[in-house]
Amino acid sequence: MSNKKRYRMLASTAAVAFLLAACGNGDTEDTSEGTDNGTDTSEEVDEEASDGETDGPAPIEFDQRVENEGEAIDGGTLSIGFVSDSPFTGIFNWELYSGNPDAMVMAYTMGDLLGYDENYQYDDSGAATFELDQETNTVTMTVKDGVMWHDGTPVTAGDIAFTHEIIGHPDYTGVRYSGDIANIVGMEAYHTGEADSIEGITIVDDKTIEIEYQSVGVQMLQAGGGVWAYAAPRHYLEDIPVAELESAPEIRENPLGFGPFKVENIVPGESVSYTAFEDYYLGAPMIDRIELETVPTSSAVAAMENAQYDLFIDMPTDQYDTYKDLPGYTILGRDENAYTYIGFKLGEWQEAETDEDGNIVEPAQNVYDPNSKMADKDLRQAMAYALDNDAVGARFYQGLRRRANSPIIPNFADYYNEELEGYPYDPERANEILDEAGYEDVDGDGMRETPEGEELVINFASMSGGETAEPIVEYYMQSWAGIGIDVQLLEGRLHEFNSFYDRVGADDPQIDIYQGAWGTGTDPTPEGLYGRDAAFNFTRWTSEENDEFMEQMTSAEGFDTEWRAEVFNEWQEYFMEELPVIPTLFRKEVFPVNNRVGAYDISIGTNPDTPGVGLHTLYLIDEERAGQ
């Protein structure tokens, strides 16, 4: 997913929309309404969960590379099925996109500035080199020779500066302005309109840029860890007002990147055609074209049975048993940098306050409301104990998902607190918590009232998509009803990915809780998801203690990685006690690869010139797709 703090919003219950962000449901993207047998399925899981049986399929181990025998044919077209029930928005710009579908379709064309190793640490394998100087609080990036935009214009240091100018601009419409960006010397003055340029950004020469930060931390050595490592074509976009960029045809219809493939045609939300960029700095691609099409989850298995595509992205894991043995394909898999969660709405997003001249006097930030319906952490904890996510992972995902115990994923092994118990299924404990907190069934209808004796009805928003979306939601609501909590599905239905996140991000007052998923990107630091000024902090939860943890994680002291790991462990304990979200499932992703693809590799940090790793090294060994 290249190198960004890519918090991707993913499709939460079905396996649609993924990797790599950040961003960010991260999960997020499906419109199918589920299946008619949803009630039966949810009842089955509820019954099995209630007797404590959560044993399911053993964890599945996958290969991460396939290499098929045969000589490469000359050119050819690689066909990709992107399994998604929501159309991609079509924002071809790293600074402005927010949903994972856009990140997916951009990955083939926009280009990655910095490369990283198997630990997601920056190395020199990308289009630019990277150097951090702890003594001067500076980062230096130097664009390599021969890196060009698709129109033949060289990529320059000015293009890297331009990305920062977009995000920091007072009229910026995206979600990327955060503490990481504000950490640049002079950025806040630029963002508030007090300065016309960013003091801490120096263009040393055409290829080299130096960025001075107020402070630096070890996370800045990590891909996506505090350094915005992208370039945008200044010569192509600079005459467009920042407020209009998101809707500009230069972003939506005719994007300009420096990646291995150029965009030839876009059918909004449906497909993208790419052609090889012969002057790609790592070498001309071995295939001539890529044709990417969105495929509804309901027809993904049929498309694989008919060998309709060479590669499937975001193949639904809830249907794994139906396609795992189909001929003509090898299935690769890995742990996703993602987790599914249930979020509690605890406040609102406060837009920046400006003076009469339009200057920002108070930055945009999350504002916690201690009187919100879900503000009682006893209620939140009880709702967590009521869910048997071990059973959900086993029954609905054939063991390809498992109960999450933390908002830090296991892939970040140095910072993941594996000793945390989290919230295993314990309805007795849930009832005890509610009893002790004063939630009682006052009127005898089987549902608890608030400690003040008032009716308690919780509105639950969740996304449509795939066969599991509806039954899982039904199971969760039944589980909460089992402890006397009345949870109702928002408007009685599931919601399509884009409209769902629009409403969640806008703090729709009708939403009390919601189910989403985050693609975490490649940096474990959670500031971009749970920081005070993080637009992606959709719960709007803040606290002074959390602020302190975020500051420690990103401080210079963190270069002592053992000390930093302890801070992470303490923060996870604190977070899971406060529980602004219930992390529900860790996830695996799978990649069916047709046997006519010469080589394909999904391992992290592999040399991009290795066959099957870099997009420019993909090749085909047969004119016909295996299985056709």
Image: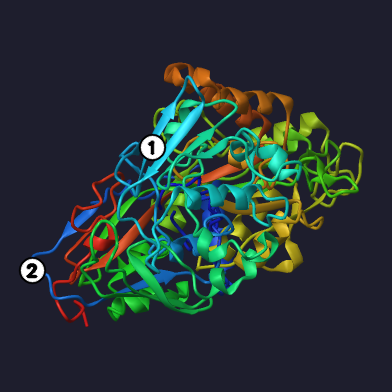
The image quadrant where one finds the C terminus is bottom left
- Does the CB distance between marks 1 and 2 fall below 8 Å? no
Distance from disc 1 to disc 2, alpha carbons, whole Å, reads 38 Å
Query: Which residue is drawn at the image coordinates 49% and 29% (left, top)?
Result: 138
Using the rendered image of the protein, determine whether residue 86 is visible from the camera's viewpoint: no
How many residues crowd mark 2 within 10 Å: few (<14), some (14–19), many (20+)?
A: few
Tell me the amino acid under the disc marked 1: Phe
Question: With respect to residue 614, does 246 lie above or below?
Answer: below
Horizontally, residue 28 falls left or right of residue 116, namely right
Q: Dot 1, how many residues are within 10 Å of its Cα: few (below 14), some (14-19), or many (20+)?
A: some
Residue that appears at 34% across and 56% down: 147
Question: Can residue 462 be seen at all in this image of the molecule?
Answer: yes
Report the front residue among 104 and 193: 193
Q: Is residue 489 above or below residue 444?
A: below
Where is residue 123 shown, x and y percent of the image? Answer: 32, 38
Q: Amino acid at mark 2?
A: Gly
Q: Quadrant of residue 370?
A: top right
Secondary structure of residue under mark 1: strand
Q: Where does label 1 land, which residue? A: 130
Query: Which residue shows up at 46% across the image and 50% down it?
Result: 393
In the image, 241 versus 5, the foreground residue is 241
Task: Check disc 2 and report the residue beneath it.
Answer: 70
Q: Position of residue 94 (x, y in %)?
A: 52, 56
Q: Secondary structure at mark 2?
A: loop
> What residue do we see at 23% from left, 71% from top?
287
The mark found on residue 582 in the picture is: none
